[in-house]
Amino acid sequence: MARTPLMAGNWKMNLNHLEAIAQVQKLAFGLSDKDFDAVEVAVLPPFTDLRSVQTLVDGDKLKIKYGAQDVSAHDSGAYTGEISGAMLAKLNCTYAVIGHSERRQYHGEDDATCNAKVKAAYRYGLTPILCVGEGLDVRKAGGQVAHTLAQLDGALADIPAEQAASIVIAYEPVWAIGTGEVATPEDAQEVCGAIRARLAELYDAELADGVRIQYGGSVKSGNVAAIMAQPDVDGALVGGAALDAEEFIKIVRFRDQ
Ligand SMILES: O=C[C@H](O)COP(=O)(O)O
């Protein structure tokens, strides 16, 4: 099955709502219909930017998709600081990132939390971008595949096939995030291939064949082509390089690099 690559810019805690408007305008100006025919492009701004991004995307009928960097596992109620799936759906978000390593590391999110958030995302029609990946110690011990598949199993517990068919998985080795230390294309393929094989075991081969698996971790215009050449890598979850519109556009145009 031909999978449309997904290039998603995770802005993390960067760019206020005014800067977000400028950034999306730069992307819209720089990208052409030809780019959007070949690649799905998404931005993942902070929550406070989403309404501005929605207004711009709707008003100018932009083809850029957008989503949130997290979603609450709860539907509503006394959960100070949380943002619900219903609120994100009301903003026409397409995606919700779940289980980013920074959420796991700094906010204590575990696989059960991720599972609850995946369920919450699907309750409101959001597509999860589920992040998985090992830290340096696990990588050094050669446990990257087992570790990452255990995270996948935990997050997908009780998720039916009709929902899992649309999920996006982002394989992000923690040691490569924001460090400039990119995984080799072979490293990325090893784990992304194992993720697809596990999806085939959990569901079936046809579903696994259709799921997009991104790589994330120090992706730049200079390394994206080699990573995208791997058979089981269907896009990138881009952090730092997504803050530079020109650089992100080059990443979207990975075939030209
Ligand atoms: O979500 C994005 C990843 O954490 C990668 O971040 P990075 O491109 O800055 O290494």
Image (spheres, helix red, strand yellow):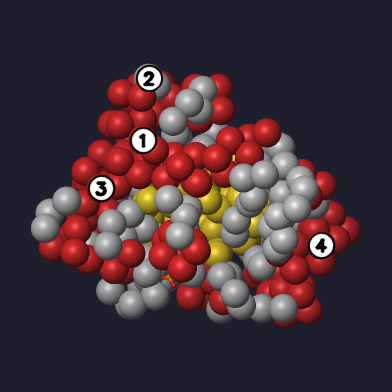
Instruction: Give the labeled residue for mark 1.
Output: 153
Image mark for residue 147: 3
Task: Answer left or right for 20 relative to 140.
Answer: right
* Circle 3 SS class: helix
Task: Tell which tag, 4 or 1, sits nearer the viewer.
Answer: 1
Please tell me which residue is depicted at 31% across the width and 23% down the height of the picture: 201
Q: Position of residue 146 (x, y in %)?
A: 21, 43
Q: Answer few, some or many: residues within 10 Å of disc 3's Cα (few below 14, many 20 plus, some between 14 and 19).
A: some
Q: CA distance from mark 1 to mark 3?
A: 10 Å
Question: Would you place residue 29 above or below residue 72 in this image?
Answer: below
User: Residue at the left extreme?
Assistant: 141
Check disc 2 and give the amino acid type.
Asp
Image mark for residue 51: 4
- The answer to whether the residue bearing label 2 lies less than 8 angstroms from the nearest atom of ligand 1 is no
Q: CA distance from mark 1 to mark 2?
A: 14 Å
Instruction: Give the labeled residue for mark 2.
Output: 204
Labels 1 and 2: the sequence-earlier one: 1
Q: CA distance from mark 4 to mark 1?
A: 34 Å
